[in-house]
Image (spheres, helix red, strand yellow):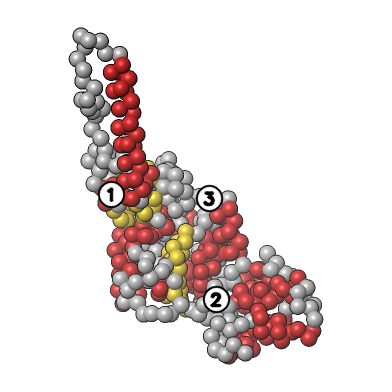
Amino acid sequence: MNGDRVAAAEATKDWWIYQGAGTPADRQARLTEHRPPWRAFKGEPDPGYTPPGTFGAAWDETLSRGAGYVPDEAEIDAVNTALYLRRPLLVTGKPGVGKSTLAHSIAADLELGPVLHWPITSRSSLRDGLYQYDAIGRLHDANLRHLDAAAAALVKGQHSADKLTPRQPTSITSPPPAAGPRTPGGPIAPYLRLGPLGTALVAQERPRVLLVDEIDKSDIDLPGDLLTVFEEGSFEIPELARIAAHQSKVKIGTQDDPEPHVEIERGRVQCLSFPIIVLTSNGERDFPPPFLRRCIRLNVEAPSREKLTQIVRQRLDLQAGADEPYHDLIEAFLTRRVEGDLATDQLLNAVQLRLSGAWSDDGDRTTFLDTVLQRLTGPLT
């Protein structure tokens, strides 16, 4: 932990969970303890299901992205408000200020496992986030099974005909007896998989972190469609509800793993700990008041000079010192940002190139900055 992190730890507020005092296990315990009675849910965890832990490639990616995030006090306050109230956090701000990285920072700080990611497009629907059902694949496989069964029956009939004697009745044209009731399409479990939101709502003691990225790009109905799920912390899978009378429990895959390993009873998914949901928006549209009422809102401002310095040090694992080779790049970044938007990762790219010895000729400085720090808005030169 560098000096900036130590200074931040000294300013920790007693009520903070995210970036708060104690070990991640201590803060997880406080998160479980402070649960509003109107946000208590009754899901029962599947004892045979173990959600991803703090190991593996997915966790390494979450930890790597989250460890370099430098939240300011206002951001930490907003995150903890959402944690205490079990409400989604709607994060707005210009592209490149770190909105998506905040979700990874929360998961890394509290050691809640890999972040579940739901990238939103104009075609995204609520069902995409809850679960996917490959009905066409199931029908295709069922047809193949029927063809295989018919071919096997024909071969068996021809084999029996070769053994017939004159005194035996010839019935090779009769269909073979049915082996029992046939489930149309075969087993459904291999063709169902929970989406990122559905996986986050699986009942478990420890909440998952879900990143709903760029929700402002969604169809106009999606924010409203999410309201019931956010309020009830549950949803139904109709394909499983229809077969509940003769098969009440079915194991299906999750966003983390397509293999069927989490049990769904009577088609209903009900959370126990409401997930930590971070919704990001670039401000390209407004949201309806009922949706906003259910969210804690945070606007992430463009980072200051001091914050940019912290970000560069943490992301690139640099020590503070008098000979820091990137102060002039931070100044150039701030100057260019006045005339048009720039993303923080553009500054990181510039510093990385400087540290690698690229663009080392002093005469190339202007071209270097024009190449790496191209404005996202405003004039290009």
Determine which residue is flagged by label 2.
96
Badge 1 or badge 2: first in the primary sequence = 2
Instruction: Please tell me which residue is depicted at 56% across the width and 52% down the height of the picture.
Output: 54
Q: Nearer the viewer, mark 3 or mark 1?
A: 1
Image coordinates of residue 82 in percent, x first then y, are 43, 68
Q: Nearer the viewer, residue 272 or 23?
A: 272
The three-letter amino acid code for the residue at tag 3 is Gly
Which residue corresponds to mark 1? 239
- Say the numbered circle drawn on residue 53: 3
Quadrant of image for the N terminus = bottom right
Estimate the x, y position of residue 359 in percent, counting from the top left.
75, 78
**Is tag 3's residue or tag 2's residue first in the polypeptide sequence?**
3
Q: Residues within 10 Å of mark 1 (few under 14, many from 20)?
A: some
How far is disc 3 from disc 2 in space, using C-alphas?
29 Å
> Which element is circle 1 on?
helix
Instruction: Examine the rendering and report whether any part of residue 19 can be seen.
Output: yes
Residue at the front extreme? 166
Q: Nearer the viewer, mark 3 or mark 2?
A: 2
Q: Residue at x 33, y 59 (%)?
A: 127
Quarter of image, res 213? bottom left
